[in-house]
Image (cartoon, rainbow, N blue to C red):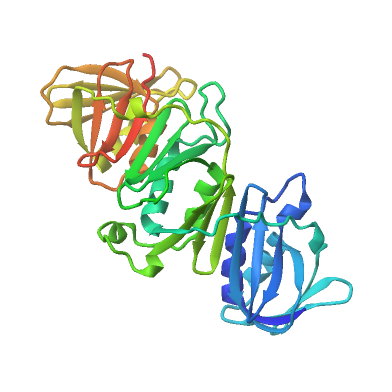
Amino acid sequence: MELKIGRNGFLSEVQKIQNITPIKGTKPILSCFLLETSGDGVYLSATDLNVGIKVYVQAEVSIHGKVCLPAKVVYDILRELPENSSVDLLLEENNRLRFTCMNSLFHVPSVDTEEFPAFPVFETQIMHQIPLAILTDMFYKVNIAVPVVEQKLYGAPAGALFSGDSKGIEMVGTDGLRMAYVCSDKLNLPVNVTKVLPKKLLDELPKILPNIDKGKEKASDAPDKKGMIMVGLTENHIIFSWQNIIVFALLLENKFPDYKQPISVKNDKVVILDRERFRQSVRRVSLLSEKKDWFIHFRLSPGKFVLDSEDVDIGDALDKIEVDYNGEGIDIGFNPRYILDALSVIDDPEVSLEMSDNESLAILRPKDQENVKFIIMPVRL
């Protein structure tokens, strides 16, 4: 195999696939990627068996072939090479790949390509086109409530529910103590789908795909082709295709907890808050909160919203926010991390905090939106 490839494009794509390859694992081959020539370019493929990616990069191919290489080693080499340079690759007889760039020379041992896991054969050819920015925004919002590992006590999988039909798509994540819910009627599928997407897909897909202006995309009902992504579903996999990138993920088999009841709750104590002012207040007060049972008090009364905390070893903190509220008072406790996580993914300048009593779930959402909700269980005081 012999080819010449641009360093910048090569580095960019290797960086994407490196997010998929585990650095350590039971199978060393999974820390490698497959480089295979095709036409006037190369395909780079990587997988951890649950999530996989294949990207295409243009190159000048002299001799066709394929090679399996350690992802981190190749990424480190490319990162140190001069920008806008070209890299010559030659697979030598001893199965070492020679990298040549200007005055630099590297030899990287390859791995037997037969050991590299075969990508699944997808039985469906039906792909549905949906707006990319809205999809990745939903991933971003829901992912804050998805646990890294399954929470068996609460029946909460390490993944998010993906449910859609011709009317729209819903996504839900929960760790048993909080829930993130997002729906959009701008995303729809011609078939009824209810699947559980793995957390790693939620983590990595927004990083792999381009950074599109979310606000601009939301305001448009007809995004251009570059703003659309193709989505396909099989019994066991979900597939995403965008320009030169294909990403697939093995769907989880877990049952997802009931989410209809929590998102439909109507609480009677509602206060409208400036999102940034609220975020700053929670951050300040949480500095002096006991980390063992991490929570802060929220005291709502007519015209006043007081946040306070206390740590017997450090001290106490208090912050007041003036609010337009004339209802019955409430004294309730929350884990500040849950509040801050929700505020970090809300784009709107004002939020609505809706409560009932100090033992019932609360809802935090953008002031004028019902399609984005963060449900949070209070901490018993």
Foreground residue among 308 and 118: 118
Q: Tell me if 8 is positioned left or right of 303 in this view.
A: right
Relative to residue 183, is residue 205 depicted above or below?
below
Foreground residue among 195 and 105: 195
Snapshot quadrant of residue 56: bottom right
Foreground residue among 352 and 296: 352
At 67% from the left and 65% from the top, the residue drawn is: 76
Q: Tell me if 77 is positioned left or right of 170 in this view.
A: right
Q: Quadrant of the N terminus?
A: bottom right
Relative to residue 316, is residue 131 depicted above or below?
below
Relative to residue 111, is residue 354 depicted above or below?
above
Q: Quadrant of the C terminus?
A: top left
At 35% from the left and 41% from the top, the residue drawn is: 182
Residue 47 placement (x, y as % from top left): 66, 54
Q: Tell me if 333 is positioned left or right of 352 in this view.
A: right
Residue 177 placement (x, y as % from top left): 44, 25
Snapshot quadrant of residue 90: bottom right
Snapshot quadrant of residue 17: bottom right
At 49% from the left and 69% from the top, the residue drawn is: 243
Residue 144 placement (x, y as % from top left): 44, 39
